[in-house]
Image (cartoon, helix red, strand yellow):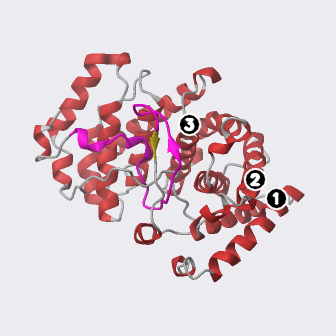
Amino acid sequence: MMDRGGAGISWQCATSGNDYKQPDDRTDSSKSGRYWHGSVRQVNAPLTYIQKRNEYRASDGFSANHAKKHSIKPVHDFNALITQERMDYLLSISARYSDRYDGKKHSQFATLIKQYTSASRRPLHHSEQRQLIPLLHNFKATSGWTWRSLTTTLHSFTSAGVFTINKCLNKGSKEAQEALLSTLLDAVIRKCNQEPETWDIDVQGVANLLWALAKLVSNGQKLEKTPKLKEAVAALLPLVKTKAESKEEKDDFIPQHISSLLWAVAKLVDNGLELKKTPKLKEVVAALLPLVKTKAESKEEKDHFIPQHISNLLWAVAKLVDNGLEKTPKLKGTVATLLPLMKANAESKEEKDHFNTQ
């Protein structure tokens, strides 16, 4: 379907089978992923692509998303994305199917916003945020939304800066921003509280989701002032632990997933989520650390660690220790495994140019 209000931009172009895997502005590569019409094989992004796209901060992690197999032409006209006709269409399709609606069109819209900011290499400007948010006051996540639609929407909007705290927003826009975040967090909590056998979400989805929750905090959302955010984190942590300890799924973790997850945990801890009062956090860290060591020592996997992964992992470990994580042999072993990788990357003719001052 072509959205007539989109200035010739195809509504369907938001997904070429990969809207669940949209890249953040700090991404690299992937393995294979399920969900969209079967299995889609992802390809490693070339290092030149990584270098161009990954202007990152060591303390500001990156999503577990990956480079798209099928590229789409970047959208430069923001006004073409946020037409009233497009918003009306989203509202009508949600109302028409009610709880039977899977959220697909909403996630495609969020993906378009994310692609716009990725092409611009920046989050939304304050003026763009003020234009967009009032149009989202009827943007609701119903119980019928799939994991993929929910994760794609929350991740894309968060990465694009839709939820970034902005003092310039008027009261109505702030209320719309809060309502939008609330409906998405409610959906996350609802999904996580389902029976484990209904957890139809893969490793990448879990990593994306926890990254998004931590990024919300990084973008100004306060845990103590947003109880649902704290509740969503608490609900998601057992799912992360289950995936990391699963014999079937732990092999699906790649360096990027682990780096993203540990960065997210460290960011949450650094912003008020106490390790001592949140046993689930410690359990997640304990489940992830062996994966770091295993992957870093693996002949097949260790070359997939790029400077960004190592930097964010070491930052996360240091921040967790700074906030009370016990210096166990497992923790020391993880750091000891990462250091040779850092040295190898720094001395590599191919990799050393990818180190920036951060």
Quarter-of-image position of residue 337 = bottom right
Q: Residues within 10 Å of mark 3 (few under 14, many from 20)?
A: some
Image check: 158 left or right of 72? right
CA–CA distance in space, label 1 to label 3:
26 Å
Secondary structure type for disc 2:
helix
User: Quick check: marks 2 and 3 in contact, CB under 8 Å?
Assistant: no
Do the CB atoms of the residues marked 2 and 1 lie less than 8 Å apart?
yes
Tell me the number on the disc at residue 91. Answer: none
Q: Nearer the viewer, mark 1 or mark 3?
A: 3
- Residue 74 % position (x, y): 25, 57
Name the residue tied to disc 1.
Answer: 331
Q: Quadrant of the N terminus?
A: top left
Screen quadrant of the C terminus: bottom right
168 up-or-down from 175: above or below: below
* 31 is within the stretch colored magenta: yes
Is 62 in front, or is 34?
34
* Residue at position x 55%, y 30% in the image: 189
Residue tagged by mark 2? 289
Choose the circle earlier in sequence order: 2 or 1: 2
State whether residue 28 appears in this view.
yes
Amino acid type of the residue tagged 1 in the rendering: Leu
- Magenta span of residues: 11-39
Q: Earlier in the sequence, mark 2 or mark 3?
A: 3
Kindly report the distance in space between the C-alpha atoms of the residues bearing marks 2 and 1.
7 Å
* Residue bearing mark 3: 202
Secondary structure under badge 1? helix
Q: Is residue 325 shown in magenta?
A: no
